[in-house]
Image (cartoon, helix red, strand yellow):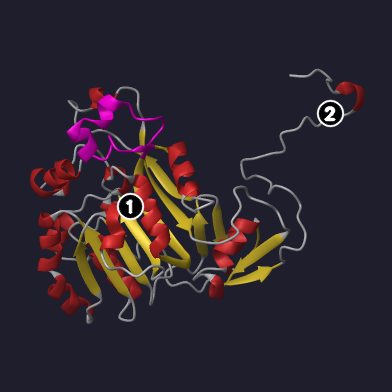
């Protein structure tokens, strides 16, 4: 599979127009604050972009960031501007042709930005421990439509957890399926190269993340993918695919459910480019200045990470009120009492 992916992205695809799905993001849909950053990225780097989401989380100034499967470097060079001259971005990719493009314009971008804070490494994202990267040394790790291409996703998540600092996060976009992908699709080299064959069933991904220490994966955004090649579409049958962005925090004491401790936060509106609201995930858009009730996990994701200075925190973990209302779970027991309740055993 490594050889097939290297051939597909190194030789068969020359620009993002060669893709056979709608994986690449629509440039017109980019947030306003991101467009001027991409305007400084060299056109050849942009033309060889094969991502499926946006992997520029907020509040990165001074951070050390790792990009898994960095390709020609589009996301690396965007992130380089967000971390600034006191931060660093490291890109890892296994495809020599893609890395050659990224390296070709490294000096060009340093001149554009006014500082050099980027480097690229050739290697496999399943073997991050072989690249000389120090454990616990990255604030944020990102990846854009690459994890699905890995034949050993356990090794990827294991390596990510090892390299993240405590309180760090894995913020990444990838392709997921609405059910487990059958062998006929998984073993098709074109479908695999198009990020469909290696896509995880979404619920298997949740289990994978939890198995490697990320107890509460948070979905940030998602959209359905269309297979734009009419010859390719029949080969996937009834499978449905989605591009989705998740954030996984490396935090101790996260629980597998949203537990209510009577806590709340107030966003100060102080994160650059996010003056009116902060979006933690698809269900948590926290408006500036407004008291926002949160579960214990959300509290930790804000208080024990790089976001802490941008929030006021109300409450503690001194009293528990059960499951947080509206978080997709409920008490499983029958609420009826007395003679109304059935006494039959199952």
Q: Camera-side residue: 260 or 184?
A: 184
Q: CA distance from mark 1 to mark 2?
A: 50 Å
Residue found 39% across the figure and 75% down from its top: 61
Q: Is residue 244 left or right of residue 261?
A: left
The quadrant of the rendering that contains the N terminus is top left
Mark found first going from the N terminus, 1 or 2: 1
Quarter in which the C terminus is drawn: top right
The answer to whether one can see residue 287 in this image is no
Instruction: Please state the horizontal and vertical placement of residue 162, each as a whole percent of the image.
Output: 41, 61
Front-most of 119 and 239?
Answer: 119
Which label was assigned to residue 336?
Answer: 2
Find the magenta span and give its range: 176-200
Please tell me whether residue 212 belongs to the stretch shown in magenta. no
Q: Determine if residue 265 is in view.
A: yes
Q: Answer left or right for 343 relative to 73.
A: right
Q: Which residue is mark 1?
A: 29
Instruction: Tell me if mark 2 has few (under 14), some (14-19) or many (20+) residues whose alpha carbon lies within 10 angstroms of its own.
Output: few
Q: How many marks?
A: 2
Q: What residue is rendered at 88% in x and 29% in y?
A: 337
- Magenta span contains residue 182: yes
Occupied quadrant, residue 197? top left
Look at the numbered disc 1 and give the secondary structure of its residue: helix
């Amino acid at each position: 599979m490594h050889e097939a992916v290297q051939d597909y992205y190194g030789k068969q695809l020359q620009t993002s127009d060669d893709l056979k799905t709608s994986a690449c993001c629509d440039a017109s849909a980019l947030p306003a604050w991101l467009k001027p950053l991409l305007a400084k990225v060299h056109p050849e780097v942009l033309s060889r972009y094969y991502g499926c989401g946006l992997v520029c989380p907020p509040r990165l100034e001074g951070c050390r960031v790792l990009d898994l499967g960095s390709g020609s470097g589009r996301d690396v060079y965007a992130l380089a501007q967000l971390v600034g001259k006191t931060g660093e971005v490291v890109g890892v990719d296994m495809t020599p042709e893609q890395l050659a493009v990224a390296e070709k314009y490294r000096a060009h971008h340093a001149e554009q930005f006014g500082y050099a804070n980027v480097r690229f490494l050739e290697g496999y994202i399943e073997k991050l421990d072989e690249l000389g990267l120090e454990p616990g040394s990255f604030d944020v790790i990102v990846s854009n439509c690459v994890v699905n291409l890995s034949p050993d996703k356990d090794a990827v998540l294991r390596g990510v957890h090892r390299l993240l600092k405590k309180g760090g996060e894995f913020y990444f976009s990838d392709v997921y399926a609405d059910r487990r992908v059958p062998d006929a699709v998984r073993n098709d080299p074109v479908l695999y190269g198009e990020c469909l064959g290696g896509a995880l069933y979404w619920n298997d991904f949740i289990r994978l993340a939890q198995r490697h220490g990320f107890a509460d994966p948070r979905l940030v955004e998602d959209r359905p993918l269309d297979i734009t090649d009419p010859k390719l579409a029949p080969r996937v049958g009834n499978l449905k695919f989605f591009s989705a962005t998740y954030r996984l925090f490396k935090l101790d004491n996260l629980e597998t459910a949203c537990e209510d401790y009577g806590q709340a936060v107030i966003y100060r509106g102080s994160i650059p480019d996010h003056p009116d609201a902060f979006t933690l995930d698809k269900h948590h858009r926290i408006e500036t200045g407004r008291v926002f009730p949160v579960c214990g996990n959300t509290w930790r994701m804000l208080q024990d990470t790089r976001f802490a200075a941008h929030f006021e925190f109300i409450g503690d973990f001194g009293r528990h009120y059960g499951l947080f209302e509206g978080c997709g779970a409920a008490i499983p027991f029958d609420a009826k009492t007395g003679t109304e309740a059935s006494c039959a055993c199952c």
